[in-house]
Amino acid sequence: MEILIHFLKSTGFAQMELGNAVMIVIGCVFIGLAIRKDYEPLLLVPIGMGIIIGNIPYAATMSLGVYDSWLPLEEGGKGDLQAASVLSLIYFGVKYGLFPPLIFLGIGAMTDFSTMLSNPKLVLLGAAAQIGVFLTLLGALYLGFSPQEAASIGIIGGADGPTAIFLSSQLSPQLLGPIAISAYSYMALVPVIQPPVMKLLTTRAERRIRMKPPRQVSRRERMIFPIAAFLICALIAPGALTLLGMLFFGNLLKESGVTERLATTARTTFIDSVTILLGVAVGASTQASTFLTKQSLLIFGLGALSFAVATAGGILFAKLMNVFLTDKINPLIGAAGVSAVPDSARVAQMVGQQEDPHNMLLMHAMAPNVAGVIGSAIAAGVLWSVLVR
Amino acid sequence: MGLENITRAGGFGLALTGMTIVFIALVLVSLFIAGLPRLLPLVNSLLPELEGHHGVTPAASTSAASAAVEEELIAAIGYALHVHRDH
């Protein structure tokens, strides 16, 4: 009888707190959004399940959660490797910024830079959208976050989950959970957040602008680009070399024509495996005791703001460019500068087609979209190199 | 909370510098891309493209070649088996 009572006390039901229950509901909502609304299912399902896994309470003497680490005692761990939980070993890839560059390798192997190469001025839209990162940084500083925390929160505006995880793991690991969840949630909510901003800042006539079809890009150009672009970006912002190195390496695998097998692996099974591990680990890191705080709410608020500002930045810069250009740009594609590949490009296409069903903006929007990935990685590199302690 | 936090952390300078660096990097990338078609003839004269590298990727050609060899092998085995049974 005593054993039974002891066991009952150790069950999740007995130890469940309100916070855990709330987080489990949030996990279910994530999975529901992914299944019912098709919002980034490849991310939200692993993260949602991770949230549920991470919020099942267990006895403190058991090593089960992501924070039951293998680290030595003096670093807050449990002293020996045997005490490490499986989840903490998976979380290692998040905590030490291992997964984001691996994801970038896969993204590089699936990215076609042709539209960007055919219309280089659209690269600037990817730069303009990074205003969201830096204005949010100011907002976070205003609210009392430290510069390192503010930089990690600001990078949510880059709309790039791996970059956000990479920077916060380096600058403010204590905020990694809320920042990662916020970044991925807003990436999933791109079709909800962006259209109102896009419609607010453009006229009907602007949304109907048709752009010239992109020129044919040679194979040589596509092969030279990843090496040259990496050299330019990494020499300017060495802090971005891990992310951009893997991005352009992945792209070189794709474009070189002699490593098709590696490229196929990188863009399929490899990125999928890393995404599963990253999603579950990030989700499981949202234990109610560390996640349900006032800081997390502020981070969510600032994250939404940064997405809206980044979208506005890209659109307004496109409008500014149109003042000087003879071949006008449809300002809707400026919104794709927030990266979130390829969702924000799809949103530009969708909003454009609401005004003109035959206007094909998707291929044009992919140019600022991939430029945004490069831009947010550079922004992360700059912030890391300036604020590293 | 307040503007003082931003000024104390050098936030305005950080944001301005960061944004400028991002722009410089992407402007340089953009200029490189714009100049790339003019650079290509020079690259092509220094490193002419190999005949086998046009169009079909080596990986694809390798798999196509191995598929052809496999078919020949199966045909040969089939023929040998047929002859063996006949005798």
Image (tube, helix red, strand yellow):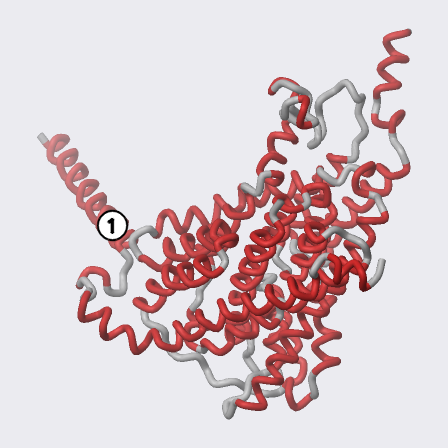
**On screen, residue A88 above or below B79:** above
Q: Residue at x 50, y 73 (%)?
A: A123
- Front residue of A388/A251: it is A388
The quadrant in which residue B44 appears is bottom left
Outermost residue, left side: B87
Q: Is residue B67 left or right of residue A125?
A: left
Q: In the structure shown, which secondary structural element does the residue marked by tag 1 occupy? A: helix
Q: Which residue is mark 1?
A: B62
| Three-letter residue code for mark 1 | Thr
Coordinates of residue A147 in the picture (x, y in percent) = 70, 53
Would residue A38 be visible to someone looking at this image? Answer: no
In x, y percent, where is residue A367?
50, 71
Residue drawn at the location 66% of the way across and 90% of the way down:
A205
Subunit ID for the residue under disc 1: B
Side of A134 where B8 appears, left or right: right
Q: Is residue A3 visible?
A: yes
Q: Is residue B83 left or right of residue A51?
A: left
